[in-house]
Amino acid sequence: MADRAAPQRRQSRTHEKAAIVLAIGLLLLMPPVANIFTLPQKIAGVPFTLIYLFVVWAGLILSGILMSQRLLEEEDARQTPPGSAPPGAYDHAGGSAGTGRD
Amino acid sequence: MLSVDIVLAAALGYVLLLFGIAFFVDQRTRAGRMRWLHSPVIYTLSISVYCTSWTFYGAVGSAARNGLEFITIYLGPTLVFIGWWWLLRKLVRIGRTHRITSIADLISSRFGKSPSLAVLVTLIAVVATTPYIALQLQSLTRSYLVIAGEDNGVAAAFWIAAGMALFTILFGTRNLDANERHHGVVAAIAVEAIVKFVALFAVGLFAVYGISSGFSDVFDDVPAEVIYGGSEIFSPRWAAITFLSATAIICLPRQFQVTVVENIDERHLATASWLFPAYLFGMCIFVMPIAIVGLKTLPAGMNPDLYVLSLPLAAGREELALLAFLGGFSSATSMVIVAAIAVSTMVSNHIVMPVALNFMAQGREVSGDVRNLLLTARRISIAFILALGFLYYQLSGGSDALASIGLIAFVGVAQFMPSLLGGIFWRGATRAGALAGLVAGFLLWAYTLFLPSFGGSVLISAEVIANGPWGIEMLRPYALLGLNQPDPLIHALVWSLGINTILFLAVSALTHANPLEQLQGAQFVDVFRIDPGGSGTFTPGTVRTEDLFILAQRILGTVPAQRLFTEMARAQGRHTGLPVPNDAMLLRLERELAGSVGGASAHAMVGRIAGDRTVGMAELMNIASETQRLIETSRQLSEKSAELEDAATQLRRANDRLRTLDAQKDEFLSQVSHELRTPMTSIRSFSEILLGDDPVGPADRTRFAQIIHEESLRLTRLLDEILDISRLESGNLDLPTTSIDAVRSVQGALTGIAGLTRDGGVEIVFDAPTAPRAVSANADRLRQVLLNLLSNAMKYNTAEAPRIDIRIGTQGNRTTIDVIDNGGGINRDEAEAVFQKFIRGHRAGRDQGAGLGLPISRALMQAMGGDLTVEFAQDGTSFFRLHLVPANAADKLTAAEPVPSAAE
């Protein structure tokens, strides 16, 4: 029971994290907050706003990488409950299932 | 300028390469030797079909015109892939579970496999895809004209369209794959994704470091308006386009095709969730620099949409220009190919197939005929869609701004959003709601954005656009109901999607879903929880497997149909012959067919043979709403906790009882030791006197010996009693009962005690009934009990003239023997206590018995099935009553003598 509940809890945690990232992304990239960053300065010769957009974007991608790793771990952990995986859907699953992490 | 020959040769060579890759991969996949293709990177690259020539050429053009605004087209998908990947995951899971072939199939399957919804979505998809394809043709043609220096665009556009139709037909309709996957095509567009990325990156590097000297040089003395595209960059339009691009990545038919339908492994989505945004990021890095360098160095009249090509050409870097041309070619062709496959699948499955179904019944039934029909339909629709795109390109006369055409298409497909999201997250969404929302949204989109985009040449005249139909200002397409929004895009988005959503919600709330809709709704909404078992129960008994096999043969072809039926028979445990048409088999067949012809058509076809289906009770239970599940769960929980409470109470009671028993045992032990010690003490002391040195007279010696003897007897009696009671209490005492006469038992006991009574002067009154009373008892033990009661009555009788009455009566079917004395009786509160061990009544003085007589008597009576109780007469006096069970009628009445008997 316990190993079955754990990945599910973590999965919803990843959902929450994704929602938080989405909210932060929207806040930083959408008006009115984004207007704070329309500054006339340049960094290394590149307009600040351009740098700002790409930095936020890169940050989003970085958090995406971290979340996707968690997601894959959870997918592996989810292999443990019998019968839940569609046959053949996960070819290389199960090795590290459920135990010994975190 | 490059020579036409070189350009054509390069393009042709590239196309041949793509053909080769697609062919090779298709062959290898068939042979099952293409494992590396099942990689998340290939999957991600195929998703990048999002970056069309609109990105490759148009992003730079947009950046040159509107500054950073172009980024919004890529921010939307980034946000969806990183922040909302679980929506995509759900779509992929639904797609895999229900063998979804297209977005039209998804929406129609969700809403009860509705054919009308499928047709509607297909129509919207065709209408919205056409301008997009036209856009690709236009940019390809223009790029060709620029690089080859020609000016006959129409011919070029025609040949490009024809070439792409050929490729798509060759590799997109090779087979009706059961899962609607096209490995060859996916491999080809993955290669194209790399080519376009490399090309744009190369041009960007060249612009920044070849033409300029680094980024700071590029952005040197660039006015802020160029970067911001006007006064304000983060405007409502910024938010609107981000929203649009976010919906497009979900709703565009070609994105649905690559993300959901072509998905091989759900896990790939995890990688794509960051790799695809990273790809977009890379594509965008050099867009702004290329635009600025183009603005700075190229002549003012140049079309910014072609800067990617013009920059290297102007700098005389022809090989780079050729690479850029191939990049643009890649981005355009990959989009057209995937879009054509996606839309042609919809057209053939949802428009051609239902029509063909009507003719199917009469027509001759040849193996694979439906399959061939479908393939032909798909091929024709591909040609038709590309022709439509070509026509649109001709009609629109080549609008200058590529981006606006793309955005018009985005708003068109955004109409799917309410039904799609509502369908997979809301059980209450109904078919009527989806229909109402889609129809209204589509009409509003066409009226406020699509038709006016022709500038008055199609359906809506320029006059109507300016002043409204019949001069009604309120109905002007760009200012509907007087909504003054300078940006037609936002205007159309607000109207179409707003009304669409409101109607979808309202009509859904007001209508009821039919059972199949409810079932499908539950299976879609709870796709991660519900076992994808059934969707409806067929009316049994009317199905012939042969008919089903013929149907499968017609759609899948003979060999795949045979394979499928053998598999199904094996699943039923039959090693030869055809499978039995039960529910599971029919559902599986329908799902397999749905992978080829779409859910609605498969449902209709199987339904024609198997009869209409009903939704079974078990399935309805399975899809019972979340609330009901929760209620059920909490009910079970509260039951469980009540049970636990019960058990706890019982345990507590048992524990209390054990404690009491333990205390009683301790008390019993101390009583026993006490009772044993008294005779032991006197025996010891008298024997010590006898053994002592002091001389004892013979009279004394005899007296002492007498005392020792009496105390020993008393000790023995006590031990006997203790043994008796422990045996009785542990149930180890074997007490054979026979049928005896109670009257004779009493008389026997009286005889035995006669000496005592005479000495004590006790009067005993026994009014013996004349008839014998047959009871089931052990004669010896009954006599023991009677003697005990009688001796108690005598011993503790303090009356002047002691008298004992004995009466025999009946109570129900039991015989009672009452022993009544006039000695004062016992108190009511003592009534039960006298039956406890070592408790003596208040009449008993010290040293008068151990207090075991009554407990033993009661235990004996109970062991014989009867009882011994204290009763109170009406005047308050107490007496003892023996209860005796009647003898079995079959037993022979014996004398008071015990008869060893195995019975009872």
Image: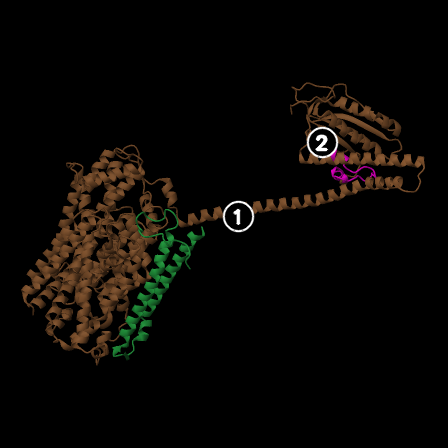
Q: State yes or no: residue B17 in magenta.
A: no
Q: Which mark is residue B860?
A: 2
Instruction: Provide the residue designation for mark 1.
Output: B641
Check the residue under mark 2 and report the chain it is in.
Answer: B
The chain to which mark 1 is attached is: B
Give the farthest residue toward the front.
B693
Residue at point 14%, 36% (across, down): B364
What is chain B's hue in the picture? brown
Task: Tell me the crowding category of disc 2: few under 14, some 14 to 19, or many 20 or more residues within 10 angstroms, Cα based.
Answer: many
Q: Is residue B809 above or below residue B92?
A: above
User: In the image, which residues are magenta?
Assistant: B830-858
* Res. B152 image quadrant: bottom left
Viewer-nearest residue: B430 or B626: B626
Could you say which chain is coloured green in the image?
A
Residue B95 appearing in the image: yes
- Foreground: disc 1 or disc 2: 2
Per the model, the C-alpha gap separating discs 1 and 2 is 43 Å
Q: Residues within 10 Å of mark 1 (few under 14, many from 20)?
A: few
Secondary structure mostly seen in magenta is loop
Element assignment for label 1: helix
Dot 1 amino acid type: Ser
Q: Quadrant of the N terminus of chain B?
A: bottom left
Q: Quadrant of the C terminus of chain B?
A: top right
Is residue B835 one of those drawn in magenta? Answer: yes
Where's residue B482, x and y in %? 25, 65
Residue at the image point whose x is 76% and y is 23% from the top = B745
* Mark 1 or 2, nearer chain start: 1
Task: Measuring from the top left, give residue A30's x and y in whole percent.
Answer: 31, 69
